[in-house]
Amino acid sequence: MAGSVPAKDGAKDEPGALLGGWAVGTPGPVRTGPLVRVRRPAPVPGPGELLLRVEACGVCRTDLHLAEGDLTPHRPATVPGHEIVGRVVAVGDGVDLFRTGDRAGGAWLRSTCGECRWCRSERENLCPRSRYTGWDADGGFADVAIVPAAFAYRLPEDRDAASLAPLLCAGIIGYRSLRRSALPPGGRLGIYGFGASAHLAAQVALAEGATVHVLTRSPQARALALDLGASSAGGADDPPPEPLDSAVLFAPVGDLVPVALAALDRAGTLAVAGIHLSDIPVLNYQRHLFQERELRSVTSNTRRDGRDFLAVADRIGIRVTVTPYPLDHADRALADLAADRVTGAAVLVPD
């Protein structure tokens, strides 16, 4: 929300208007209140940027990692939130992909250099100069948000904003993680942890003919997994009922890495989806990696991942399980996420 010049070109905010939101104050455990209320002048979109009035913003586990200090802040007092659904109320110079009144989405990946070998080889997620919404610039835990037009997504008009928000990070990252797991056609997939991202990735795998086994500590999440079509749902440390061709670890728990690797069949692949993971215990080569088992990380996403996933989600009619919170209760949403009290995805909506 940085900036002090009033919004232009169709924005509804009067000159000098103060807009509300939340910022990360002093990072620490949620019980210490790392999120603080802020009021700042309405921002103005610069060249190539959109000003969105936020209709909904998902609450991602990455927001929790930033608030609690697991990820080092890139700037002080940043507004978190990178699953932004909004209406364009102003456009900066040079924008021709969006007009005022359009519905648009802002996601985690905010910009890349476009010049390095990673960008030039369609691996912009690895760009060393990449920047991220809610980490390098203010995000969507606010009334309005600035989003670069080149990294924004056009969103359908016929979907509820709250159900669209989790698609923009949980869905996209889950999709990339699923692809990184090298799941073969009709394969057996294990999913460790079953929150916002996992419950969307599971539906993509099921639609593609996979057998899905969910391993998670939450009874509510296990019930949701079975309701969505999983073949089994057990505890996080339980062995699945059959060897796995692929697995995705969504829970940020390093202790589960050897558990998931041991559950893989020969030539199986484990993809670790999170941006943060607690320490991994010592692995035993024979038990965990021999017979060509693979361990892969997942880093952010490309814009192509986003476009591909949104097309798949629309085609299969993906079901988004949402726990809504008023924007005024963003701190409670974050605390509930930390305590595993959220079923599906937590989403902030305007008060």
Image (tube, rainbow, N blue to C red):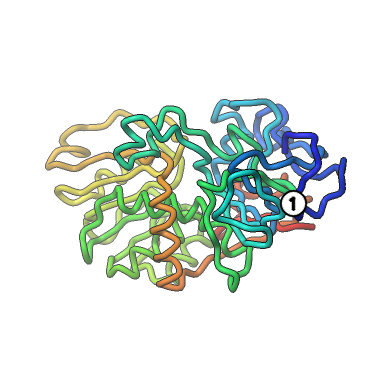
Q: Residue at x 59, y 29 (%)?
A: 69
Does residue 166 appear to the left or right of 333 in the view shown? left
Quarter of the image that includes the N terminus: top right
Residue 8: image location, x then y, percent: 76, 47
Secondary element at image label 1: loop
- Amino acid type at mark 1: Asp
| Image position of 229 with respect to 13: above or below | below
Does residue 75 appear to the left or right of 188 in the view shown? right
Residue 26: image location, x then y, percent: 70, 27
Quarter of the image that includes the C terminus: bottom right
Q: Which residue is mark 1?
A: 9
Residue 21: image location, x then y, percent: 76, 44
Q: Residue at x 87, y 44 (%)?
A: 15
Does residue 75 appear to the left or right of 22 in the view shown? left
Q: Is residue 64 visible?
A: yes
Q: Is residue 338 visible?
A: no
Q: Residue at x 55, y 63 (%)?
A: 155
Q: Residue at x 54, y 41 (%)?
A: 62
Q: Residues within 10 Å of mark 1 (few under 14, many from 20)?
A: some
Does residue 65 appear to the left or right of 113 in the view shown? right
When asked about the image quadrant of residue 44, the answer is: top right
- Number of marks drawn: 1
Residue 46: image location, x then y, percent: 65, 39
